[in-house]
Image (cartoon, grey):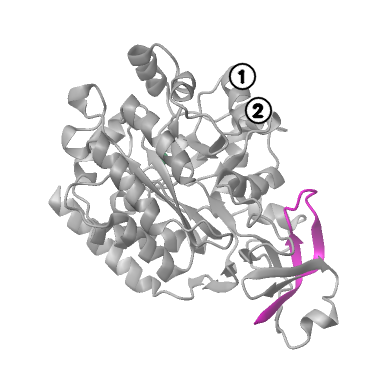
Amino acid sequence: MSRTVIENAVVATVDPVGTEHARGWVAIDGTRIAGVGSGDAPPELTAGATRLDARGHLVTPGLVNTHHHLYQWLTRGYAQDSILFDWLVALYPTWARIDADLVRDGAAGAMAVLARSGCTTVGDHHYVFPQGSGDILGGIIAAATDIGVRLHATRGSMDLGVSQGGLPPDFAVETTDAALTASADAVARYHDPGSDSMVRVAIAPCSPFSVTTDLLREAAVLARGLGVRLHTHGSETVEEAAFTLERFGMGPTDYLESVGWLGPDVWMAHCVHLDDTDIARFAAAGTGVAHCPSSNARLAAGTARVPALLAAGVPVGLGVDGAASNESGQLGTELRNAVLMNRLAWGASSMTGRDALRIGTMGGARVLGREREIGSIEPGKLADLALWRIDDVEHAGIADPIAALTLGGQPPLARLWVNGEVVVRDGDLARADQDDIARRAATASADLAARA
Ligand SMILES: [Zn+2]
């Protein structure tokens, strides 16, 4: 088994007590973390190992992305000044023309940027499946495998077209039965429940305004029967709350609870508009939240009550959301954006940089149900690690190395390990050709635009 020892780095373990080492080491054995500590690494660990002198660097757990729509890489820069519902209506006709080849090329672009921003685990929410579009999930999984990131894919769906009172056009939705059958098939084909799994699948009807009550209810039954998690959008905007109030006579949390969607196996994106009662019910149920600060700002959806969620014990992770509402696509920068947005909304002491690092790592691991395997630097966990350079001109001399990452500009990424494999080296993808990915993503974006 190959061993690598990272030495002389600042180490932020994000373990349960937030242990940090001003000069420490991390040892990787194969796919797992063999040890972590302060000062010099023990000679019995360095003997015969590949040694990496990482002075001037900060090592953290790899970042965990809990919400994305990778295919939206193909539609960056559209509907730049719209709120969510107008933005969706503007984009649905274009999205309805995707196919597996285009999505694979767009997803590769999105995941290249995620990896280069410190992300080791990618959560994706894919919910547009035009007829005859091929194996879209298979394309996303192939792109993740090429780049080397861990993937939590979801088989999403929409079955509530505009003629039935939903938001999406009828040509963009599936039947309820087709969505359920395809969801079960995706789990059977691609879900790996193993502890070192590189691909897991969850079931993810899109949102209360694009999915029928039957599909929500049946999807929850299906997922629980198959032992996989559930994901959707919830309480993103005031318009969504008005929709559920008018159609069902209740707010989004009441509605989702009424169809079996509050539970420890569920995570929801955004959850911007939760009141105290909603938060208490999320906490009691153990339902997780994907906090997407940049997307919420881009669409002027509001600021999620992350400090209140954390105080109540709700699992909270970070998400970039789709690149059509967050053209950056970087997860590393979401750490800083989470701090800034929450402080603007909830006050100076509402969130620290270390809080942001915790939700971006362990928080995300909890949200995805992987807290025993990833999210912190602890012996026995999978070796998903980010090594940030903080002796560059932008960060050198900063009083607190953690602030270089959480309050400063995103530091250059010296290395990214996923499952013990180097996925990024000196800022560039190590296993895939990022120039080729860029070319293919540009061509796919142009092809899709020409189809629309
Ligand atoms: Zn989303």
Q: Which mark is residue 431?
A: none
Label 1 sits on a secondary structure element that is helix
Q: Name the quadrant of the N terminus.
A: bottom right
The magenta span reads 1-25
Q: Secondary structure at mark 2?
A: helix
Residue 184 image offset from top left, x and y in percent: 35, 47
* Quadrant containing ligand 1: top left
* Residue type, mark 1 in image: Asp
Residue drawn at point x = 61 percent, y = 45 percent: 366
Answer whether residue 107 is magenta in the image: no
| Alpha carbons under labels 1 and 2: distance apart | 8 Å
Q: Are marks 1 and 2 in contact (CB under 8 Å)?
A: yes
Give the crowd class for mark 2: few <14, some 14-19, many >=20 residues within 10 Å: some
Q: Residue at x 18, y 58 (%)?
A: 447
Magenta region's main secondary structure? strand
- Residue 215 picture quarter: top left
Quick one: which residue is furthest to the front in this view?
225
Residue 275 in percent (x, y) is at 57, 19
Q: Is residue 257 visible?
A: yes
Task: Identify residue for label 1.
Answer: 276
* Residue 96 in the image, given as x and y percentages of width and height: 20, 44
Residue in the picture at 60% in, 39% down? 316
Residue 141 in the figure: left or right of residue 159: right
